[in-house]
Image (tube, grey):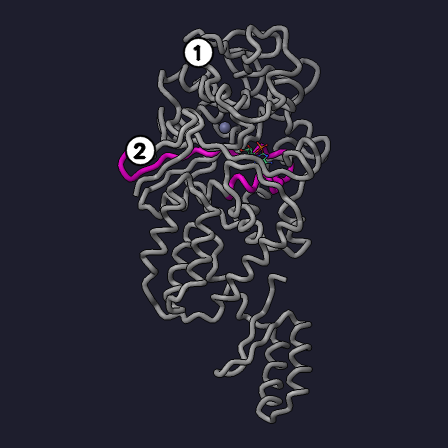
């Protein structure tokens, strides 16, 4: 099947052609681990998870690399201000190392809860310092770097088409290179490859280098790790649209300066999850965590469903109401498949083809979900419906099989009430049966009377 992606680099929908047959090298910019991931960050990882699952469904072997930024991301993307991890250590009253360890753990727990497949490899920025210094040394030898009082900067004027990604961006202008201009920079877009430790304070994270004690600039880790794991040029690079203006052009510039080649062939960017009129962001302070959803009794899978209802290249407004609607949508799917026959059946080829075609079109998840609905509304046999939906779920990643099992896993108290109700029905004591039905509702158990007897589901997705 031909797959098409909207490539931010060409601004066109292009047919996907991997470098090596049946293999895909995929790099996803990971989180900066100085705070809880918010549901905006997590939405991005849900999106790239579906991309990866789709590639797997089409028979590709996917090598997926993700970095964890635990050093060097400064308060402003333009290399101004303090390292975010250093700021967080005062807030958290921990060392920078403890802050990073803690939030890496939270991030990994969150992605597991969202049923996001783990990357082939996670790499921490602080675990690749030697490789980053070696990489920067080559850039220096090739004449791309210059020294200022606070670090070694990359001279972007030496790259003929620096920022072609940013120039193409149809995104709102981010802060970044345009604010707090450093007068020592030769060009506004120049960025730090190595920062010196401040004279007057001791950092928790710092290393010796040929240029002086300090730490790597934020963009360096991605150029280095992607090359280490995926080679000079790999297939797909993903990230949020905020990366189109600063981080990705800088990664690309470093990589091209080092290898003389394009870093990645396809650059895919997710639009932002918005909340109350703006981008949900950690720095703005108004953000919602996955645990906030769970406290309000939303399942992480309902959030996943909410994300997939949108096209990843359209901004998506988060609201509690919309999340409730998504939860209701997921519940309807589970309700309709709860009692389907487990017997092995073949998935419907026609519906699967329609589903994959939707995803092959720049992985249109909203359309793919509508194909799943069509399956449920179709005249197919129940067991075929189930087989088809579960096959689709390999890409959508809701883990429908275990969710529907939870629908059938009734609380013990409810089982007792159901038995009593069976007796009441046998005795044609309809008043008692109705009373027991109401009692069951209090246990979140819905009961239906069918020709085959009572059928009950535990409606845990309330
Ligand atoms: P950060 O931890 O800030 O480096 O961000 C991690 C990832 O989340 C990056 O790929 C960002 O582009 C992405 N991201 C940040 N905010 C949002 C948002 N509101 N919606 C979607 N993705 C976002
Ligand atoms: Zn990156």
Residue at point 42%, 24% (across, down): 9
Q: Secondary structure at mark 2?
A: loop
Quadrant that contains the N terminus = top left
Q: Is residue 354 visible?
A: yes
Point out residue 129 in the picture as x, y percentages from the top left corner. Answer: 49, 24
Is disc 2 in contact with disc 1, using a CB cutoff of under 8 Å? no
Residue at point 31%, 33% (across, down): 17
Q: Is residue 102 visible?
A: no
- Are there few (<14), some (14-19), or many (20+) residues within 10 Å of tag 1? some
Quadrant that contains the C terminus = bottom right
Point out residue 316 in the picture as x, y percentages from the top left corner. Answer: 58, 40
Q: CA distance from mark 2 to mark 1?
A: 26 Å
**Label placed on residue 420:** none
**Label placed on residue 159:** 1
Asked if residue 42 is positioned above or below residue 73 in the image, the reply reads: below
Q: Is residue 142 magenta?
A: no
Q: Secondary structure at mark 1?
A: loop
In front: label 2 or label 1: 2
In this view, the residue in front, 46 or 208, is: 46
In this view, the residue in front, 150 or 280, is: 280
Q: Is residue 444 left or right of residue 269?
A: right
Find the residue positioned furthest to the bottom: 427
In this view, the residue in front, 70 or 418, is: 418
- Are there few (<14), some (14-19), or many (20+) residues within 10 Å of tag 2? some
Point out residue 169 in the picture as x, y percentages from the top left corner. Answer: 51, 24
Residue picked out by circle 2: 17
In this view, the residue in front, 397 or 382, is: 382
* Quarter location, residue 86: top right
Asked if residue 437 is positioned above or below residue 152 in the image, the reply reads: below
Q: Which residues are magenta?
A: 17-46
**Ligand 1: quadrant of the figure:** top right
């Amino acid at each position: 099947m031909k797959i098409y992606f909207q490539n931010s680099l060409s601004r066109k929908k292009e047919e996907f052609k991997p470098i090596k047959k049946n293999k895909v090298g995929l790099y996803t910019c990971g989180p900066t681990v100085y705070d809880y991931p918010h549901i905006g960050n997590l939405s991005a990882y849900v999106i790239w998870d579906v991309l990866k699952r789709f590639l797997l469904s089409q028979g590709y072997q996917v090598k997926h690399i993700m970095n964890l930024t635990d050093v060097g991301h400064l308060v402003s993307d333009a290399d101004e201000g303090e390292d975010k991890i250093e700021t967080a250590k005062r807030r958290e009253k921990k060392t920078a190392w403890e802050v990073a360890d803690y939030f890496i753990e939270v991030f990994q727990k969150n992605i597991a809860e969202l049923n996001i497949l783990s990357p082939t490899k996670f790499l921490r920025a602080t675990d690749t310092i030697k490789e980053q210094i070696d990489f920067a040394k080559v850039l220096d030898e090739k004449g791309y770097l210059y020294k200022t009082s606070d670090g070694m900067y990359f001279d972007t004027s030496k790259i003929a088409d620096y920022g072609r990604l940013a120039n193409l961006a149809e995104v709102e202008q981010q802060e970044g290179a345009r604010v707090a201009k450093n007068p020592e920079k030769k060009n506004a877009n120049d960025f730090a490859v190595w920062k010196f430790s401040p004279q007057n304070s001791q950092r928790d994270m710092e290393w010796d280098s040929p240029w002086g004690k300090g730490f790597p600039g934020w963009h360096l880790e991605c150029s280095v790790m992607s090359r280490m794991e995926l080679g000079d040029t790999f297939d797909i690079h993903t990230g949020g649209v905020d990366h189109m203006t600063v981080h990705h052009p800088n990664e690309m510039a470093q990589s091209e300066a080092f290898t003389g080649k394009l870093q990645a062939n396809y650059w895919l960017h997710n639009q932002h999850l918005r909340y109350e009129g703006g981008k949900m962001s950690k720095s703005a302070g108004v953000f919602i965590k996955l645990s906030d959803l769970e406290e309000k009794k939303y399942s992480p899978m309902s959030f996943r469903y909410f994300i997939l209802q949108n096209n990843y290249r359209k901004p998506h407004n988060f609201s509690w109401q919309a999340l409730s609607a998504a939860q209701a949508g997921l519940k309807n799917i589970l309700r309709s498949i709860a009692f389907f026959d487990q017997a092995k059946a073949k998935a419907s080829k026609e519906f699967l083809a329609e589903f994959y075609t939707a995803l092959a079109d720049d992985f249109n998840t909203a359309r793919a979900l509508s194909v799943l609905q069509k399956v449920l509304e179709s005249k197919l046999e129940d067991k075929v419906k189930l087989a088809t939906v579960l096959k689709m779920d390999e890409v959508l990643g809701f883990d429908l099989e275990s969710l529907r099992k939870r629908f059938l896993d009734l609380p013990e108290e409810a089982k007792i009430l159901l038995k009593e109700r069976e007796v009441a029905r046998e005795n044609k004591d309809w008043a008692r049966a109705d009373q027991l039905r109401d009692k069951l509702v209090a246990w979140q158990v819905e009961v239906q009377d069918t020709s085959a007897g009572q059928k009950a589901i535990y409606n845990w997705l309330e």
